[in-house]
Image (tube, rainbow, N blue to C red):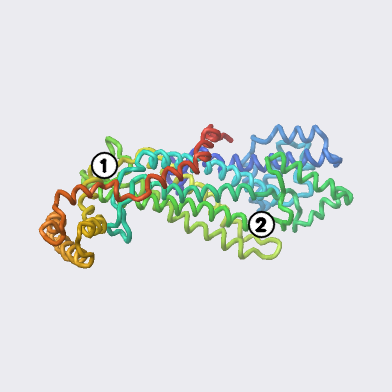
Amino acid sequence: MKMKQQYESPLSNRYASPYMLALFSADNRYQTWRRLWVSLAKAQSRLGLPISEAQVAALEAHICDIDYECVKQREKEVRHDVMAHVYAYGKAAPSAAGIIHLGATSCYVTDNADLIIYRDALRYLRKELLKVVANLADFAQTYKALPTLGYTHYQPAQLVTVGKRAALWLQDLMSDLEEIDFVLAHMRFLGCRGTTGTEASFVELFDGDHDKIDEMNRLIAHDFDFDQCYPICSQTYPRKLDSRILNCLSAIAQSCYKMANDIRLLQHDRQVEEPFEKNQIGSSAMAYKRNPMRTERICSLARYLIFDSGNAAITASTQWLERTLDDSANRRISMPEGFLCADAILRLAQNVTSRLHVNEKIIAKTVQEYLPFIATENLMMEAVKRGGDRQQIHEIIRTCSMRAVEEMRNGGTCDLLHFLSAEPQFGLSEAEMKELLKPERYIGRCVEQVEHYLAQIKPYICDINRTSAEITL
């Protein structure tokens, strides 16, 4: 119960997935440091430095058994977290204590570990994003031909379809998928580059053999599934990458916010609703309510993530020369929290999109209420074809529309067709006009647009089958 007396991040105890929590855990981070030290020692041994196979084996045997109390006490003494971990690792593997971290600087483990974790986190988010994409693709396909009232300025406009609207959300998320793929494709490894990125310590260690230095970095990068190192580095990898990553996560938040906000508006009109459980309580006071709590939570978390991206932008732009440490404390918070928040948003988005409920009768009623206004241009063309004067017909429609709107404002129904049929010069009966008011005649190319777009993104949706296996650490 002691932990309940201390602050806990809602991202860790309420929202993020077990995978993402494990990925950013202390155990995973510091075990990754140790794997990096093993890889460095192994590469240096292979390239001729006086490091024995037994020393490498000793390090490999103690990757997971981290004595955190030893680290804590040592850090109090030396005020340096990396050197505290070097000390504790040496205590666990005393035969190899003298070769741990040879020629390296702290950023060898801190930055390379970050790159590994961020890369794996992006891969996981890509998989989670694809699940939302698949849900929306199914939804768009199902409702591609269902007419619904469109809105511009949140005012009634021409008809669209429920599936077409979902395809717009889907298109935004697909652009986010493209950004993730771009960032992943351009991520590089830092390697072991020394205090200012010149690799001077390794020029000394390898007696000026530059090929061995390049090979050492290739070997280490290969151990962690990276194809290349950054060609130019200072002590750290370019902080521009952090900005690129958080911008990518912010983009996901923006797209999910747009979708969730639209659903909230539609739920207000009872047209489309997020999932609502059998025993769910919508309000502590108003028992009848069905508050859109999932989509509200998406919007709430998304706002945080959108603004979190500014941290990396500031850090990237204010780094001094080859290195400054004012990035460290900020990155410890902004980067993991950004990933955990994106994970939480996508988990909620999966839940919402997997069980969106469409109230077709309410949608149809809304369509029928506004369809006479939407169809007025078609009605005008039909009246002209029957011999009416275009300008005169236009004026009849205008005056009758204003009259019908006034009736609706006073609580009445839409009597536009009745008013038009009462005008002899209009030349159409109410029954004839109703024949022209079939909603599917007013959705344009919605069906074709949805079908065409779903065919375009089908390869990505099929990709889910290749990435759906649970990622494990």
Taking the view exactly as shown, the residue that stands out farthest to the right is 207
Left or right of 21 in this view: 417: left
Q: Residue at left 12%, top 58%?
A: 419
Q: Nearer the viewer, residue 272 or 141?
A: 141
Furthest-front residue in this view: 387
Residue 54, percent from left and from top: 80, 32
- Give, as a three-letter code, the residue at label 1: Glu
In the displayed structure, does residue 155 sit left or right of residue 231? left
Q: In percent of the image, x 76 and y 32: which residue is there?
A: 57
**Residue 451 screen position, x and y as percent:** 42, 42
**Residue closer to the observer: 206 or 409:** 409
| Quadrant for the N terminus in the image | top left
Q: Nearer the viewer, mark 2 or mark 1?
A: 1
Q: Residue at x 16, y 66 (%)?
A: 399
* Residue lying at 47% horizontally and 56% vertically, measured from the top left: 306
> Residue under circle 2?
238
Q: Report the disc number at residue 360.
A: 1
Identify residue type, mark 2: Pro
